[in-house]
Image (cartoon, helix red, strand yellow):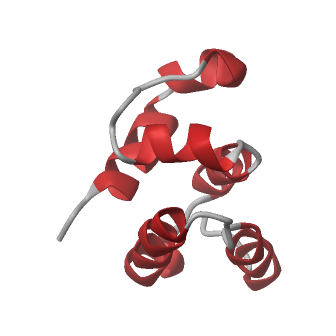
Amino acid sequence: MTIGAAELYRLKSDARRGLLENDLILERFFRRYADALSKEDGVVLAQLLALSDNDLMDLLIGRVDALQSLGDLCDTPGFKRTLMRLREKS
């Protein structure tokens, strides 16, 4: 089941970041996947968007694959799938 319009709007609003690089990556992600995001994707994205800009950037560019502050979320298939999508370059 995909997320609703209100939840998608909230995620897109939360995706406006202080670092331009984060903004560009998140904008590209939403252009590609907004219409197909599942409820699980929404939960993962909400937790990622709650991170500091620098922690989020570290994940997005592959500097780290997990953060202690995210706990077990980093081991879930939904997290790994979402992170892989966020890291896609083309």
Q: Horizontal and vertical percent for residue 6?
A: 82, 81
Residue 45 left/right relative to 58:
right
Q: Is residue 72 above or below residue 58?
A: above
Q: Is residue 6 above or below residue 67?
A: below
State the residue lying farthest toward the left: 90
Q: Horizontal and vertical percent for residue 64?
A: 41, 27
- Write the residue at 49% across / 19% down: 75
Residue 47 left/right relative to 89:
right
Q: Is residue 36 above or below residue 81?
A: below
Residue 25 found in image quarter: bottom left
- Write the residue at 50% across / 47% down: 57
Q: Horizontal and vertical percent for residue 58?
A: 46, 38
Front residue of this view, candidates 72 and 14: 14
Query: What is the quadrant of the N terminus in the image?
Result: bottom right
Query: What is the quadrant of the C terminus in the image?
Result: bottom left
Front residue of this view, candidates 17 and 10: 17
Front residue of this view, candidates 83 and 6: 83
Q: Horizontal and vertical percent for residue 54?
A: 59, 43
- Write the residue at 50% across / 37% down: 79
